[in-house]
Image (cartoon, grey):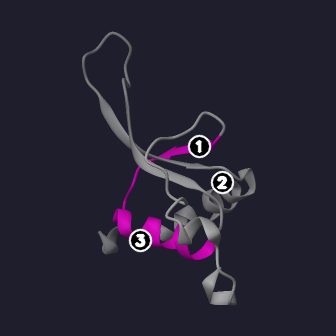
């Protein structure tokens, strides 16, 4: 991490954030109550591994045509998913949105 004077090669080559979620990533789905920028900026600053952040669409009620949306975040390092899930409530303040 740059704040500790260490350069992350994945960041230098633009490989940290991936555009699709690989099957081996540990994923979390959640409702978002803040801006996407606050969440992604926190990930860039506090974590070091590759990650995915995007929309997750699902059918909430079987047999209906309604589709709901949540956000999905995935981490290549499972420990980073645990850390993010513990800190998520402090990032989600409705006043920031």
Q: As displayed, is residue 93 above or below residue 32?
A: below
Q: Is residue 29 magenta?
A: yes
Q: Nearer the viewer, residue 72 or 48?
A: 48
Answer whether labels 3 and 2 touch (C-beta < 8 Å). no
Which stretch is magenta? 25-46
Around disc 1, counting alpha carbons within 10 Å, would you say few (fewer than 14), some (14 to 19), or many (20 or more)? some
| Quarter placement of the C terminus | bottom left
How far across and how far down the image is residue 9, in percent? 63, 69
How far across and how far down the image is residue 78, in percent? 72, 50
Q: Which circle marks residue 5 in the picture?
A: none
Q: Which circle marks residue 81 in the picture?
A: 2
Q: Which residue is mark 3?
A: 38
Secondary structure under badge 1? strand
Task: Count up the numbered dots.
Answer: 3
Q: Is residue 79 magenta?
A: no
Residue at (65% x, 67% y) in the render: 48
Q: Residue lying at the far top in this picture: please name it.
A: 63
Secondary structure under badge 2? helix
Q: Which circle marks residue 27 in the picture?
A: 1
Around disc 2, counting alpha carbons within 10 Å, would you say few (fewer than 14), some (14 to 19), or many (20 or more)? some
Quarter of the image where one finds residue 4:
bottom right
Answer whether labels 1 and 2 touch (C-beta < 8 Å). yes
Residue at (62% x, 88% y) in the render: 3
Q: Nearer the viewer, residue 23 or 92?
A: 23
């Amino acid at each position: 991490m740059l704040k500790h004077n260490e350069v992350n090669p994945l960041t230098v080559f633009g490989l940290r954030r991936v555009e699709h979620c690989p099957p081996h990533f540990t994923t979390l789905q959640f409702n978002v109550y803040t801006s996407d920028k606050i969440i992604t900026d926190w990930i860039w600053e506090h974590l070091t591994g590759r990650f995915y952040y995007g929309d997750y669409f699902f059918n909430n009620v079987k047999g209906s045509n309604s589709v709901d949306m949540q956000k999905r975040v995935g981490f290549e390092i499972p420990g980073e998913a645990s850390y993010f899930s513990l800190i998520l409530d402090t990032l989600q303040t409705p006043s920031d949105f």
